[in-house]
Image (tube, rainbow, N blue to C red):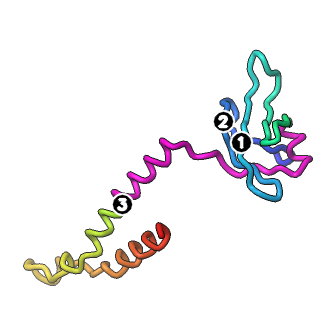
Amino acid sequence: MADRCEPPEELRGQDGWHWVDADRPLICQWLCADEYQRDEMWKMPSANLYSPESAYRRGYRYLAPVTTPAEVERLRADLARLVEVVEWYANPEIYKPSALGPHFDVRDWSHVARAALAAIKERKA
């Protein structure tokens, strides 16, 4: 719905922490409806509780879920594995002419792999 500040549909049924924008990004808690609470609500850093409609009227806009430490660790492991693969492709030695003849030669893509590695290392710095 366009006039509501709320998480994507797949995240609405569970409590969680999310990034919400209101002139600056904020981390807010989403409280889903349950037997104690009739409606879904945002708990803002100020401890105010707003419905999705009320939050939208006050200028809040949903951005994204907050990444958990376990998700961050998994992403780091995935990135490390991808860097290993790209480092292998960055080695120009693997692109030497094939002993089987020119039809088996592989185009040298090491410059692309080296550029990707440089961009990753630049972001880490």
Examine the residues drawn in magenta and state their main secondary structure: helix
**How dense is the environment of label 1, judged by Cα within 10 Å: few (below 14), some, or many (20 and up)?**
many
Is 66 in front, or is 52? 66
| Residue drawn at x 33%, y 68% as measured from the top left | 86
Magenta stretch contains residue 54: yes
Say which label, 1 or 2, has the lower sequence index: 1
Instruction: Tell me the kind of residue under disc 2.
Output: Gly
Q: Is residue 41 left or right of residue 119?
A: right
Is 90 in front, or is 108? 90
Q: Identify the residue under disc 2.
A: 16
On the image, the x and y values in percent for residue 74 come to 43, 47
Q: Identify the residue under disc 3.
A: 82
Instruction: Tell me the kind of residue under disc 1.
Output: Pro
| Residue drawn at x 70%, y 34% as measured from the top left | 12
**How dense is the environment of label 3, judged by Cα within 10 Å: few (below 14), some, or many (20 and up)?**
few
Quarter assignment of residue 44: top right
Could you say which disc has been placed on residue 7 in the image?
1
Pair 2/3: label in front: 2
Tell me the SS state at disc 1. loop
Residues under labels 2 and 3: Cα distance? 30 Å
On the image, the x and y values in percent for residue 103 come to 17, 80
**How dense is the environment of label 2, judged by Cα within 10 Å: few (below 14), some, or many (20 and up)?**
some
| Residue drawn at x 82%, y 26% as measured from the top left | 39
Residues under labels 1 and 2: Cα distance? 10 Å
Instruction: Tell me the kind of residue under disc 3.
Output: Leu
Residues under labels 1 and 3: Cα distance? 30 Å
Could you say which disc has been placed on residue 122 in the image?
none
Tell me the SS state at disc 2. strand
- Does the residue at mark 1 contact the one at mark 2 (Cβ under 8 Å)? yes
Tell me the SS state at disc 3. helix
